[in-house]
Image (cartoon, rainbow, N blue to C red):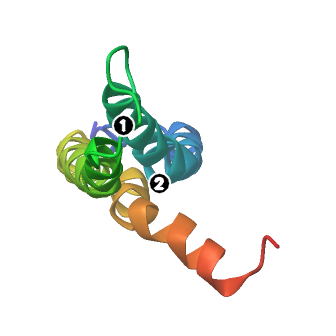
Amino acid sequence: MTDTPARIGPSRLKDASLSLLSLPLLGAVLPFAVFSLVCALGSGPGHGDDGDGLMWAFLGYGMIAGPLVALVVDIVVAVRSHRTGYRLLPVAAGIAPFVAPALLSTGVLW
């Protein structure tokens, strides 16, 4: 008697739900959280606005660090989820950093 082939890996429902959840988390929440953290480090105790431009530097660092961290995390999520058998999650992780800027630049949300 032959065995029927079974799908090995996560269920399609789990794959779809994780991919839909990852779009806003990896595309908008993570870059904003990193940006806010870096800017908070620049405006902490002892870092008043005394005209030396330090807060502008941290603002610039935050604007660079947010998308960079998001891209690195998205690549890690895409590679690891592809290796474990997910089909939609690597695609969602790959396009996540581009969805929020694309929506904001089109003016759909305004």
Would you place residue 110 above or below residue 93 in this image?
A: below
Amino acid type of the residue tagged 2 in the rendering = Gly
Q: Can you identify the residue that label 2 sits on?
A: 27
Identify which residue is drawn at 34% across, 46% down. Answer: 51
Where residue 107 sits: x, y (%)?
73, 81
Cα distance between the residues tagged 2 and 1: 34 Å
Name the quadrant of the N terminus. top left
Q: Nearer the viewer, mark 2 or mark 1?
A: 1
In the image, farthest residue toward the bottom: 106
Residue displayed at 38% across by 63% down? 91
State the residue in front, 97 or 36.
36
Task: Note whether 72 is above or below 14 in the view shown.
Answer: below
Q: In the rendered structure, which amino acid carries the disc numbered 1? A: Asp
The quadrant in which residue 6 appears is top left
The residue furthest right is: 110
Left or right of 78? Residue 25 is: right
> Which quarter of the image is occupied by the C terminus?
bottom right
Element type at marker 2? helix
